[in-house]
Amino acid sequence: MTKTTPRRLRAALCMTTRPALLAGTLSLCLGAGGMLVPQSAGAQPPARDAPASTQRQQLDRVVAVVNDGAIMHSELEDRLAQVARRARAQGGGLPPRDELKQQVLERMVLEEIQLQMAVDANLSVDDTRLNRQLRGIAESNGLTLDGFADRLEAEGSSLGRVREQVRREMLMRKVQQRQIGQRVSISNRDVERTLQRQGSESGVVEEVRARHILIEVTPQRSERAARALADKARRRIAQGESFAAVARELSDDDGSALNGGELGWLRPGQTVPAFDDALGSLAKGELSQPVRSQFGFHLIEVEDRRRQRVDPQAQRDQARQAIFQRRANEELSTWKRELRSRAFVDIRL
């Protein structure tokens, strides 16, 4: 694709970021170049005979043009600082800064593309649903909403910032649901195979409540590096760190990371085969070794097991939904790669 400067920058989307827990800050988006402003009062004044151009300093600049949007240097630095603070707080390590910067910026680019799609489709998030989601996140951390706000303040963030982050994630999920739903088809034979795999007896199925941490394999993170990070995360948990805290810091699963990796109750056939096999082999309370799937490496912990009775039609409906979820997850990775390849992206690191 021939690179040309986009005609306009979508200012409403220049704030797009997604750290592990803390949201990014709003920055100014005034064009494709850097923004020059006068020095602050506390700075040393320039020499009297200095050229006028040196009497101003560059505070911000574009690090990536994404279609008609932009990601600013201040946003990238804010995200990197948050990742570094969280890693220090949890005693974790980070890759070299240049490598980390590329990984973080690539994720921000993908987020920007999806949020642009949400704007183009006039999608929005209802405040009632957004507030309900925030309360759920607080409760999953064993906190009231006020307690959650206090925790965020102590970590250098705020409830308002996380609220904006969650709003953006909900918008991206709406986009994904619209796009992926059109790419997944399920036959009656598919449903029958899933019911056989579940091995139900008289409408009774076994469910597993689990949580996981996903470490993706990406162009910026090799399989060896991803496996090493998964091993390190497992050691941290084995040494007494909270699974939820490590998940919020490291997991690449956008849908569960904020909730400490929680997946809820799962049935056989609902997840991809490698994950499904691991669920079946783990005892209650057991933490898996890294499990490789097409998404990367998973650390899986089984929290509980139960047997549930369901009527035949409900079981068929749930099996169909399980197939859809599994195939949608598989299709999502492909769709994201296609999305990235079709977008105009000009990296300016």
Image (tube, rainbow, N blue to C red):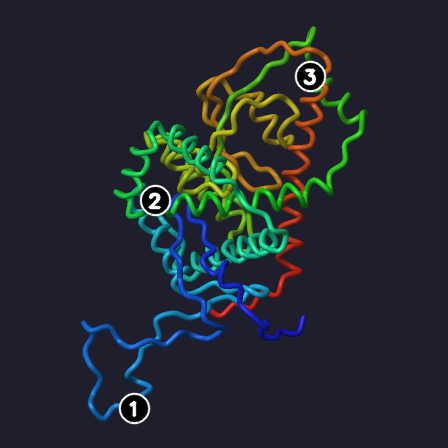
Name the residue carrying label 1. 51
Which amino acid type corresponds to the residue marked 1 in the rendered image? Answer: Pro
Image location (x, y in percent) of residue 200: 68, 12
Under tag 2, what secondary structure?
Answer: loop
Of the image marks 1 and 3, the number of the one nearer the N terminus: 1
Image location (x, y in percent) of residue 242: 35, 31
Looking at the rendered image, the disc whose residue lies closer to the viewer, 1 or 2, is: 1
Mark 1 and mark 3 in contact? Answer it, CB < 8 Å: no
Residue located at (59% from left, 43% from top): 174
Quick one: 85 or 47, which is closer to the camera? 47
- Number of numbered discs overlaid on the protein picture: 3
The residues tagged by marks 2 and 3 sit, at their Cα atoms, a distance apart of 44 Å
Under tag 1, what secondary structure?
Answer: loop
Looking at the rendered image, the disc whose residue lies closer to the viewer, 2 or 3, is: 3
Q: Quadrant of residue 120?
A: bottom right
Quick one: 77 or 168, which is closer to the camera? 168
Which amino acid type corresponds to the residue marked 2 in the rendered image? Answer: Gly
Can residue 253 be seen from the camera position used here? Answer: no
Can residue 91 be seen from the camera position used here? Answer: yes
Q: Quadrant of residue 232?
A: top left
Q: Is residue 31 left or right of residue 294?
A: left
Q: Quadrant of residue 193?
A: top right
The disc at residue 92 is: 2
Which amino acid type corresponds to the residue marked 3 in the rendered image? Answer: Ala
Mark 1 and mark 2 in contact? Answer it, CB < 8 Å: no
Q: From what the image shows, is residue 237 above or below residue 168?
A: above
Name the residue carrying label 3. 314
Residue located at (61% from left, 21% from top): 267
Image location (x, y in percent) of residue 30: 45, 71
Q: Is residue 144 left or right of residue 257?
A: left
The residues tagged by marks 1 and 2 sit, at their Cα atoms, a distance apart of 46 Å
